Image: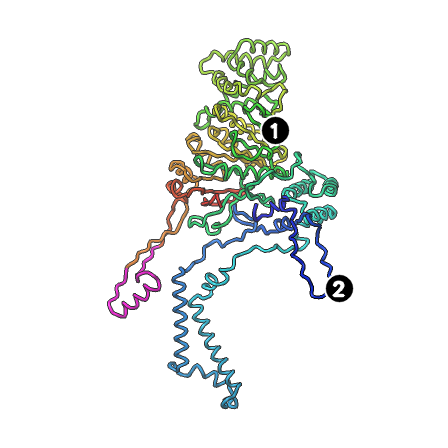
Amino acid sequence: MDGDGTRDARGTHANPVPRPAGPPEVPAKPPEAPTVPPRPARAPGAPDGSAFLTWLRTPRPQALPGVWRFGHRPRPEEEPERVPGRQLLSGAVIAFLVGWLIWSLLWNGYLGGWWLLPLYAMIPDSWAEPHSFTSVVVVYAYYVLIAGIIMVGVGRLGRWSEIWRRYGPPAWRRAVPGAVPAPAPEEDPAAWPALRAAGAHDAAERLAADARSGLMRDVDHARIARAWQGVQRGRHSLATFTGAVLSQGAGACPHPSGARDLPVRQARHDLVTGQVRIGTAADDARNPYAYRGAGLALGPDLLGTSLLAVGPAGSGKTGSLVRPLAESLCLHALAGRAAVVVVGAAGADLGPADAYDVVVRIGHPDSVYDLDLYGGTTDPDEAAVVLAEALVGDLTEQHQGGDTRRSTTVLAQLLGPFRAVHGRFPGVPELRQLLEGAPGPLAELREGLRAAGQESLLRELDARERQLDRPGDLGGVLADRVALLDRPAFAPFFDTSGQSRPFSLRALDHPVRVRIDLPQRGHADASRMLARLVLAQFTASVSVREDRSLFACLVLDDASGVVTPEAVRGVQRLRSAGAGVVLTLRTLDDVPRPLRGPLLGAIGCRMALSGLTPWDGQDFAEVWGKEWTEARDVTDRQIIAETPAGKAVHMLRRVITGKAPTARAVTVRQVERERWSASELAHAVPAGHAVLSLTSVKGEHAPPLLVDLRG
């Protein structure tokens, strides 16, 4: 974490080693009085909060969407005209020679003595005596004035000031960031002016003291600021907040896990703005000038419109995008701002297990947590909707209006009666038997319903039994999909008897960090089905949350086979629910053709990484659209000199400009062109780069930008 202060704020530089003093010099004679060294500002080894204060006080100006705001220096919207260096130097030399020529002509009297008339008019006759010191000073001062006027004129014509800025000492000096001056107390974020304005002066003093002493980190600052927002909204009382701060200081209002930071960080984070830096906008003519060279970052304000990244294996999706985003969302969760669920293959580089509160390793015998197959709901109809989407969502007809209503009805006819009899939903083996129409479980279920007097549910079960023998019944298809989970490797999982610790996505009401490892090896179909299950449960859970100020995000490292019509509709609803998803794909061929356009339209942030195929690039080119641009048609016609003087002039122009003298005709017209064509996306994106377009939850847009993910 170089440059943003977060590494020092975490305490890695909290114990500076004092520099040993050199050997004392032996004085020639005893000193008259002993010299007492100054008292150190703090005890040796005490933490220092200067790095944290510098990080906190660094300006973060408002910027365009996606710009890394930490220490950002805005650039003009339009690129200033830049004269080529050879032409600039040649013009400066010619201007100097012209000035020298004018001065020589004046000094030698070839232009007459009219330029001395003001001097003669001002000098008295008494000063014109020979060997008069005053007259000599005045005359030479006048000469210097005239020479200065000539030099200023030719200097402006020759652009000497631009040469000074481009090649002089201003260009030699590197911009070294100095110490950020301490602002006024009412504007100093380290002094907590909002708390002082509300009357909590003691709490503000305690937090300011912890910041100066190095006891506060960036996560602590963000967490306490989040708690203060809860006080302003009336969720907590001021007395409770003040008491916690006075007793615990920077450790007040802790996360339920007690953690105040992640075990390790790989990306650059700024929790004041909520951004994580993912790269740098390339200095390319296709990027707007205001973005060139600026850092590119993502935050909840952009992830709230969801993000789709497409690129082949090895293009950097996991390391350059998923890992930094997962890291950032986990930090937001520690600050009480977000809840995150990260789903990926077992062994994927998604961060250490200690960075998460809940780690679900499906198919791993040592997994502490289990996954709730029904999403924590007690409503059979709701459970049937989510489960049908997971089981057969990818088999739905991909035309307009295709859905999983028939599969939902089949599951609801079984889940409702089973829960009424047993007080729980069926496990995987039990659900498979019911879908296959096994006589024993169905008869047992019928007897239980009769004993409980559940006539309405008994009619549901009768309807299911009548449909078993009909052609085209979906029970067999659902049973085959459930059989993918009814394997020995998954035997300890998806238990509904209460003997395991199932995790439910209903917990997204709290700032929780969850990682779900899918069993890719040997169970690819089951992994895709479980990924659809998690996505369906996520979209269903976040829409019924009470606190939508807590940003919820689902990160799917590989969304192959996950995109269904219902999933696209669910993604469209996330923006208003204060949530978002991050999906990565190797190719858009993993998405059915009728769903590619709706998916790209529902996603606000789109990323095309290097190595994209031309047909994938065509889909991105269509969704990014076209723009009006100024096209210039330049026609150069070489000028041929006829006379020796003309040839000499042409030779001089060739030496100065490096080009043959030509007559140029320029035709300017407005044309509509694609922002990025399919061919450019497939062949013009360098390795380690990506083209990224952004949309914020407020509706602000950023055009497709060429981003260096290694910067």
Q: Residue at x 65, y 39 (%)?
A: 260
- CA gap between label 1 and label 2 equals 75 Å
Query: At label 2, which amino acid type do we have?
Result: Ala
Query: At label 1, which amino acid type do we have?
Result: Arg
Residue at image mark 2: 33
Front in this rendered view, residue 376 or 129: 129
In this picture the colour scheme is rainbow
Q: Residue at x 58, y 50 (%)?
A: 60
Q: Quadrant of residue 225?
A: top right
Q: Quadrant of residue 593?
A: top left
Which element is circle 1 on? helix
Which label is found at residue 172?
none
Sequence-wise, the earlier of marks 1 and 2 is 2
- Against 207, residue 386 (above or below) is above
Residue furthest to the left in view is 642
Across and down, in percent, residue 305 comes to 52, 38
Q: Which residues are magenta?
A: 638-667
Across and down, in percent, residue 304 comes to 55, 38
Residue 297 shown in magenta: no
Which label is found at residue 506?
1
Binning the other alpha carbons within 10 Å of mark 1 as few (below 14), some (14 to 19) or many (20 upward) gives some
Residue 664 shown in magenta: yes
Q: Report the side of 486 relative to 238 (left or right).
A: left
Q: Nearer the viewer, mark 1 or mark 2?
A: 2
Across and down, in percent, residue 21 comes to 66, 55
Q: Report the side of 449 relative to 234 (left or right).
A: left
Front in this rendered view, residue 43 or 568: 43
Binning the other alpha carbons within 10 Å of mark 2 as few (below 14), some (14 to 19) or many (20 upward) gives few
Front in this rendered view, residue 251 or 115: 251
